[in-house]
Image (cartoon, rainbow, N blue to C red):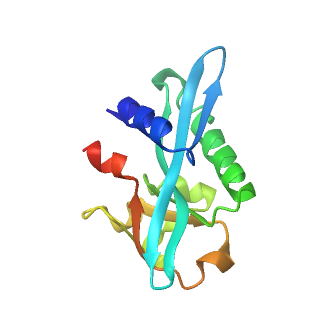
Amino acid sequence: MEAELVERLRESCAEALSLVAEDEEIVGHILFTPVVVETASGPRLGMGLAPMAVVPERQREGIGSHLVQRGVEVLRERGCPFVVVVGHPEYYPRFGFTPASTRGLISQWLGIPDAAFMVLVLEPDAMAGVSGVARYRAEFEEAD
């Protein structure tokens, strides 16, 4: 299911950032796609990290960490104001992610534990006073 989602997003979303890790073959992949937060002053566009995968026999080697770090670097260079992720609260804080609720952001999906929906603010000035529902692309809804 994730592979089909990635393929649909790569075909339909020119703004997506897709990175792979290679070691004679592809050993990991990460995808960032647009996320919109509707605010009183209009929409604020950022990115969502999803999905990320590392082949099972290469996990725990730092491949996923490298993909996250490089992706965040590229997004920061592009002026992206924020990145959200639904993920493991023990993993993503090492990259600076914090619970999105502390910034007034909530997930479009009900039932996501507060600790699992996180945000990394890359442009603090652009995110000052921004709060609301973070909405992923429609393809994520179709993947359910």
At 61% from the left and 31% from the top, the residue drawn is 20
Q: Is residue 78 visible?
A: yes
Question: Which quadrant is the N terminus positioned in?
Answer: top left
Q: Residue furthest top?
A: 24
Closer-to-camera residue (92/127): 127
Quadrant including the C terminus: top left
Task: Say which quarter of the image contains residue 77.
Answer: bottom right
Percent x, y of residue 10: 49, 37
In the picture as drawn, the residue positioned furthest to the right comes out as 77
Measuring 60% from the left and 16% from the top, which residue is drawn there? 25
Q: Is residue 39 left or right of residue 76?
A: left
Q: Is residue 52 visible?
A: no
Position of residue 140 measured from the top left corner of the image (x, y, whole percent):
34, 48
Q: Give the residue at x 54% y 33%.
A: 29
Q: Give the image location of residue 134, x and y in percent.
A: 41, 66
Relative to 144, 5 lies left or right: right
Q: How many marks?
A: 0
From what the image shows, is residue 136 above or below residue 55? Answer: below
Is 30 placed above or below 111 here?
A: above
What is the x, y in percent for residue 52?
49, 39
